Amino acid sequence: MLNPAEDIVGVEIEAKNAGNVDDVVVRRRAAADEHYQVKYSVDGRHPIDQAWWVTPATSKGKSPLQRFWQSWRTLSRDGQRPHMGLYTNRPIDVSDPVLALQDGRTGTLGPRLRLAKERSEAGRGRKRWASHVGVAEADLLEMLDHLVLLTGQSAWAGLVTSVSDRMAAVGLKGDELAAEQGVQAIRAWVTGARGEVDRQALAAEIARRGLHGEARQATVVVQGIDRDPWAAGATVSLDWVDLFEGDHPRARRQLRDPGHWNGRLLPELEGAERTIHALGFDRVLVRGYMRLPAWFATGVAFGDTRSLRVASVQGGQRWGSDSTPVDFPVHVSAPVELGAGGELAVGLSVTNDLAEDVLAYLRGSALPVGRFVAIAAAPAPSRTAIPDAASAMGWALAVRQVVRDQVRATGASKVHLFLSGPAGGALLLGHLWNRIPSTQLYEDLSPGYAPAFLIPG
């Protein structure tokens, strides 16, 4: 409500004249209102299946599907269609032919169910649903286009993360304690039968509870190898999951079309940075499920030269570029002269020593690399080699200086960069990566490597 871009004028709890989607109603000035039905079960493990949708709770009652349809008809006015949502801690039955067609991006059933062939299991299920409601299939699908299924919403930590994103973006405190203060306020509104909250009432409650923060902070969520169920709270969210090969996060290492690294993914990161700047933010929290090249490229997009400060959460700690760095020792191995050209290869070993694997890859490739340099965390790579944000900044600055020195010594026109380390470190290194030639990043295929982003010099 405090975000001007959202155009929210008020929120109603147990709203009147809202059909069966009256638990929470978000009122907007110009766009369609949002109507949510909240159904929480004591045991949220049992999935919502097709039987749940078409079975009335009582012998004389209506089924959930019929109730949503009735609400849809009631709330559709003057050519405007309502936005409806089912919010529940129960998961969806992905083995059901109809429910399995929920769209991963929008959370709705309509778009993919519409494409099901008439004689397929999903097509027959679509016909049964329309018959159960007593409407044409096209009318049912239009309603399902506007019904978002927010299922499996049981993780408190995830909800706090989403709330924190939104609170920080409008200049409020965004830690778990602040979120709990918000919960207490809303609980008081519900038990006190306060049906409607507008901006003025919200601002007064925020001031009373001392929730104002020091500065606004944007959140950028990059969904690389897996989707984030709480991405909706972010200022900007990118979704690349379907662009990768593989049906599991661990298997998603290569793009289906390698041209997308720089043809689509890098421009999307750059577009996200422009959006953040246009909204007036200079502080950015980055989160999401992605591999190291994407963390590095995100750091580059939100770089130090763009007058931005970036941060991530690493092991429960905030690792930010505004942290005061400490001297961090790195071990630079004797250069390995490969003599294949005028380019430089660099292997960064923080959590694991990758030097031998990288050398094997370089020797088996046709890359025009003249020298390979291994830079390892001292005294040795390990999962705890970088203990905190100050050390992460010190490590990033030390690595950047070594690479600059090597480029100066060799006259290299291009750097090939191989990474093994914490995600937060890769983000900070990318953030500081300047005055260095174009840099080719590599995905670790275990075994072997494949080219990823090419960062312009």
Image (cartoon, grey):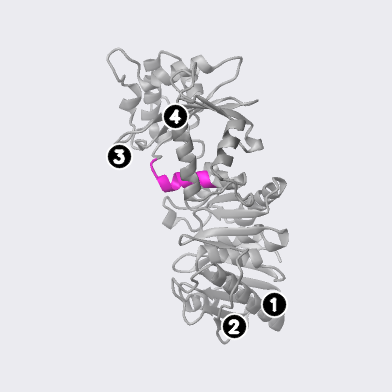
**The magenta segment:** 154-164
Inter-mark Cα distance, 3 to 2 = 57 Å
Q: Is residue 156 magenta?
A: yes
Between disc 2 and disc 1, whose residue precedes? 2
Q: Residues within 10 Å of mark 4 (few under 14, many from 20)?
A: some
Between disc 3 and disc 2, whose residue precedes? 3
The image shows residue 5 at horizontal and vertical percentages of 65, 37
Q: Nearer the viewer, mark 4 or mark 2?
A: 4
Pointer 1 and pointer 4: residues touching (CB < 8 Å)?
no
Picture quadrant of residue 204:
top right
Residue at image point 44% right, 47% down: 158
Of residues 119 and 191, the one nearer the viewer is 191
Residue type of the residue flagged with mark 1: Ala
The image shows residue 366 at horizontal and vertical percentages of 59, 73
Secondary-structure class at tag 4: helix
Of residues 332 and 3, the one nearer the viewer is 3
Q: Residues within 10 Å of mark 3 (few under 14, many from 20)?
A: few
Residue bearing mark 1: 412
Pointer 4 and pointer 3: residues touching (CB < 8 Å)?
no
Q: Residues within 10 Å of mark 1 (few under 14, many from 20)?
A: many
Q: Nearer the viewer, mark 1 or mark 4?
A: 4
Residue bearing mark 4: 190
